[in-house]
Image: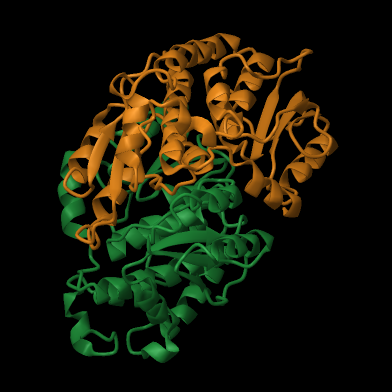
Chain colours: A green, B orange
Amino acid sequence: MRNLDAHEDYKVDSQHLAKSLRELAGNFPRPKEEYAAPYGVVGYGEAWWPAELAHLWIPRLMTEGGTQFVLQGGLDLGAAAGAASAAEASGARVVRIGFGGKVDVSIEPYPLSPYQYLRFLQEATGESEAGRRVDAAIELLAVELAPEIRTEDNPAKFFAWSLVERIPVWVVSERYVWLAAALQQTFARVAGSLSVAPPPGSLEFFITALEARHEQGDPLAAVVVGDDECTRLAVEILESRVDTVLELPRLPAEGLIPEMLAAWYFVAWAAYYLAILYGRDPADAEVLARLREEA
Amino acid sequence: MRNLDAHEDYKVDSQHLAKSLRELAGNFPRPKEEYAAPYGVVGYGEAWWPAELAHLWIPRLMTEGGTQFVLQGGLDLGAAAGAASAAEASGARVVRIGFGGKVDVSIEPYPLSPYQYLRFLQEATGESEAGRRVDAAIELLAVELAPEIRTEDNPAKFFAWSLVERIPVWVVSERYVWLAAALQQTFARVAGSLSVAPPPGSLEFFITALEARHEQGDPLAAVVVGDDECTRLAVEILESRVDTVLELPRLPAEGLIPEMLAAWYFVAWAAYYLAILYGRDPADAEVLARLREEA
């Protein structure tokens, strides 16, 4: 029987994802030159979220002068290449980041790559102070959530146990743009499991979506990130309709982007432990590599 | 036993949603004056999707001159009011559409209201030609999908039967921005049921999210909208992992927005019939009205 506190449990982790999680803070490509403003950012495949995050300080998708960042996260059926050509025609300097053809800055496909795209962009566009706050939060959590911290003291392990054979429903503060979908993506990549991100206007979704079926015993777990009027109302609505409500602990992060990255990093650890409990390799490399050859 | 072809089945439809569906084409508030360009559009609550659709021809969220449309779809904890004040301070003429305080154009809360917001915006900003194509598609479908068309000839009834006690996973062509989340919203409002919209980068989600649990028998149905390389690959991936794959029939629509609205309208009918099969009132009025008093 697995218990998450025994060394043998972790043998299934063929790519040492725990090591990558633990050493994540600071592990990203540094810009080696200056990039001229104005900036534009578009992101594809696994890099869609860092592009959305960057729009919190870079308001343009495409720019006609300055620097156009194209985050090339694969599986996009040519969309990134199309965006890069369009930008070149418009006179911007195009910087391609990611993997596949012709990248200027290489980031390998990887469930934790959103962190790397984000940190590169922060350093390249004058946001390194916010970047340092992201790293500070992740460094603190890396110690608290590591495998050697036993289940009774490790909230990520507790979350994993609570999510076994359940489908998480992400209940996220309205301030955290796109975070629910990012958690859905990473939970799929690492835990190999399905979860539900609500559409915008999440309150009306929560109150209506479980009307007809809520006595049919879908094994749902509401996972709450952030504490505001919206999440409090959502919890009131969901309490009687899901198996369990889990609230993320208060995380040691300051500022909007650091808070989101800290929540994402917490969920990545919880997903990691859930994969271990399922006896599943938390590396997703093989199946996606095959698909990447096709798409 | 309900069969969708008997008059008695429909008694549960207390608000006559079938009539509203049937008479939807053309049922929207007409602009009574000219609105000066440039335009900006933001949308909240149930009106988030028409704002995203409008961004296909109106690239700005907020504008400093011209006309700022604020779609006030409720349940936004004051966000629409905040956007309206910000726009007024910046010198734009603010036009508030929807319900709640101080609206200029009234649209009642209603599961089919996305159509009404969209059509108003199209007429108000010089897009009435695309609007006519939306209406033409919906008019044709209104005849084909109506309750008096028996199950063997009515694909919306067939979809409803196929979705009983299953959770739809929306597999949507990458061209159809935000459509998966819009279907998730409307399916919740009308059928009272849960469904799953993938995050952006949907191919990697489909291939990873069902790894660990796909032998556990979650009763999933992939619902496919549009036919392109992305949906074809998704179907290949999902075929062995879900209970059933349902492809929307080819719909009689021309152009991006008409195609999306036609798909949405088809799913609204399917959700309506599913509510009838569950014996659930497809009107969602009561529970949302209570929530609106709080939020």
Quadrant in which residue B200 is drawn: top left
Q: Which of B217 and B136 is in front in this view?
A: B217
Residue situated in front as seen by the camera: A168 or A52: A168
Q: Position of residue B243 (x, y in %)?
A: 23, 46
Q: Residue at x 46, y 57 (%)?
A: A214
Camera sees residue A284: yes
Residue in the picture at 61% in, 19% down:
B119
| Residue positioned 45% across, 47% down in the render | B193
Q: Is residue B173 visible?
A: no
Q: In this view, does A229 lie to the left or right of A184?
A: right
Label total for image: 0
Left or right of A239 in this view: A105: left
Seen in the picture, residue B259 relative to A77 is either above or below; the reply is above
Task: Left or right? Give the position of B142 relative to B203.
Answer: right
Q: Residue at x 60, y 14 (%)?
A: B26
Q: Position of residue A141 (x, y in %)?
A: 46, 79
Write down the quadrant of residue B255 in the picture: top left
Nearer to us in this view, B270 or A293: B270
Q: Where is residue B285 in the image (x, y as percent from the top left)?
A: 64, 41
- In what quadrant of the picture does the N terminus of chain B appear? top left
The x, y position of residue B210, in whole percent, is 26, 55
Up/down of B217 relative to B220, above or below: below
Q: Is residue A103 above or below residue A2?
A: above
